[in-house]
Image (cartoon, grey):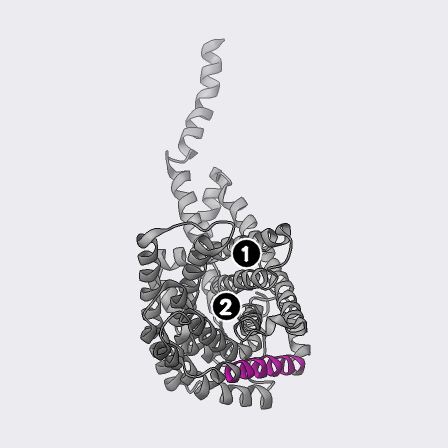
Amino acid sequence: MMDRNKEKLLPEVVAAADIAPPPGSSCRSLSRRLLQQLLQVPLACNGFALGLTGLCNVLLNLNAALSSSPPPVKYSFIVAAILALFVAYVNQILYLAKISVFPCKVLREEASTPQQISAQVSHLTIPLLTSTTYSLLTSTHMMKLDLGILGLRIAQGTVAVWCTLQLVVMATFLLRSYREGFYPEPAWFPPTVSLGTFAMAGAALKFPPALIATSVWSAVIMMVFTLPIALFRCYYRPKEVAINGSIGVLQAPGSFVCICWLVSRSSLRSNSEGQQLLLGPLFVGHTLFAVAMLGMLSTLWCVFMRRVRLKDLWFNSSFAGFTFPSASSANATLLYVKFYGFDTFIVGKVCASVLAVLVVILISLINIMWLGKLLHCCSGNLSMMTRVPSAQSMDTDTSSSSSSSKEKKLLVSSSVPQQNSGVNIGINTSPDM
């Protein structure tokens, strides 16, 4: 009886051994699928990381403006700022991992047009993340850590490297724009006006005043040349220029440059009067703040002109264009009120605080929608990746590899934004994103 059972089971055992996957094949398959999942990390992660960095600074500046608040309120602002900074790091690290693993593919598919180059804002995000983290660890009353000279030098080196890369990105963007006839619009601001990143990040890291002043005035010059043309085109061509969430970037240059000037001038208050004058007299701050408010009001009007289109697009990744620029407007207002002493007036403090709270709500809502969509996509793909393939599924995967590769090519080609769609700050203009 035992021999008969063995004879009956033997063919089944042999057949199972024939179709069983070789040892380690499931691990290799899982690694391959993880790499494919990494390749699907969207370009918009750049923009949302930048917006969350701006949100962190809004919360910190709001905490400083409400210094008379009870301790629980202060701690809640700092905890919220740390949470925003953490999510910003997650977004940025995901995209940096994608670039590190697939550098040629990413540069070929996501940096081939002026709009896509504009969306590559890592050169702006990483210096601001570095300086914000350094300030948060060394200056807030909850921490005040002593990172020493080594921590300062690491932060300075990181900012210097990525700000140097910004020059390469700007030169590439301007060359592509000239060749393709891409005229100034909001997509021009991230690679050009971001020349002021060195001043904004370097002010907290004790860079030389001459370098900081050079960075500020370079950003001012780029703003003077690009903002009027972009305003004109956005106002008179609402159906052709910035027809999605990228219209929110219209407010970016004025508020960004205003912050650069205010932060740099504040950092030089303890220096000699000659070094302070590198940034010009005090009325320069009033002028830049007026330009920032003009940009914010113009953005609101242009959004109203595109309200039907924006309502149809809600929610796609182009709304990242409202995050960092809105945070810059709020930060510019809070810093302006504090720098010129208007926070002693109840009206100035209330107006700045209300604007900051509205911006916090807006950016939080947009990021919650984005994270929900991102987690939904990741959970679906991870469930597929953790599934152990059977013999039938292995045969099916082998037979369908050619058709899936064709579908991938179609998906990649359809996800590439059109040339005149106004992509910026990590924005993808496809309506289904």
Give the residue type that dot 1 points to.
Ala
Residue 110's image quarter?
bottom left
Give the numbered dot on residue 81. 1
> Magenta span has 206?
no
Q: How crowded is mark 1: few (under 14 residues within 10 Å), some or many (20 or more)?
A: many
Quarter of the image for the C terminus: give it.
bottom right
The residue closer to the viewer here, 33 or 360, is 360
Q: Mark 2 points at which residue?
A: 415
The residue closer to the viewer here, 322 or 115, is 322
Q: Can residue 431 be seen in this view?
A: yes
The residue closer to the viewer here, 359 or 144, is 144
Give the numbered dot on residue 347. none
Classify 381 as above or below 52: above
Direction from residue 145 to residue 149 in the image, left or right? left
Q: Where is residue 9 in the image (x, y as percent from the top left)?
A: 47, 20
Which residue does the image show at 33% across and 63% down from the upper left? 104
Q: Where is residue 326 in the image (x, y as percent from the top left)?
A: 57, 71
> Magenta span has 303?
yes
In the image, the segment drawn in magenta is 287-304
